[in-house]
Amino acid sequence: MQRAASSPSRHLRGTATLVEAEGFIAATVRSLMMRLHTRRAPNVFRTVDEVATWAAALLQDPELTSAGLAEAIRVAREG
């Protein structure tokens, strides 16, 4: 993550971290992940839907919906 964020390609629009968990420990992990991002604003999300909504807004492509991106993430994680 640090390498991608520190020397992004010209095609990179953003980076995000997904920590899918609930409770105090998960919140602590997300907080630590946010502190690791030193050069860019941290994008640490709690759910697939949250990260997909962020990515869809960032990409601004009418063919990419947050629902479609969330489904793509779920499929990629299964395979």
Image (spheres, helix red, strand yellow):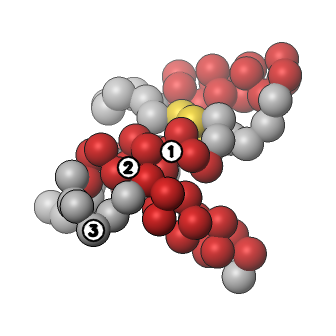
Question: Depth-wise, is mark 3 or mark 2 nearer the camera?
Answer: 3
Could you say where residue 36 lies in the image, as x and y percent from the top left? Answer: 52, 30
Under mark 3, the amino acid is Glu
> Marks 1 and 2: in contact by CB < 8 Å?
yes
Residue drawn 40% across the image and 41% down it:
54
The reply to whether residue 17 is in sight is: no
60 displayed left or right of 30: left
Kindly identify which residue carries mark 3.
Answer: 63
Judging by the rendered image, the residue that carries numbered circle 2 is 55
- Of all residues, the one furthest to the left in this rendering is 10
Residue 2, horizontal then vertical, whole percent = 44, 46
Q: Residue at x 57, y 46 (%)?
A: 49
Marks 3 and 2, Cα distance to the nearest angstrom?
A: 13 Å
Q: Is residue 62 left or right of residue 43?
A: left
Residue type at mark 1: give it.
Val
Q: Is residue 24 above or below residue 54?
A: above
Q: Which residue of the protein is positioned furthest toward the bottom in this rendering?
A: 79
SS at mark 2 in the image: helix
Q: Secondary structure at mark 3?
A: loop
Residue 8: quarter of image: bottom left
How many marks on residues? Answer: 3
Distance in Å between CA atoms under marks 3 and 1? 17 Å
* Residue drawn 27% across the image and 68% down it: 63
Residue 26 vertical position relative to residue 17 in the rendered view, above or below: above
Q: Which mark is residue 62?
A: none
What is the CA distance from the residue labelled 2 to the residue labelled 1?
A: 6 Å
Horizontal and vertical percent position of residue 69: 47, 62
* Residue highlighted by disc 1: 51
Tell me what residue is drawn at x 25 percent, y 54 percent: 59
- State the image coordinates of residue 37 (x, y, percent, origin top left): 45, 31
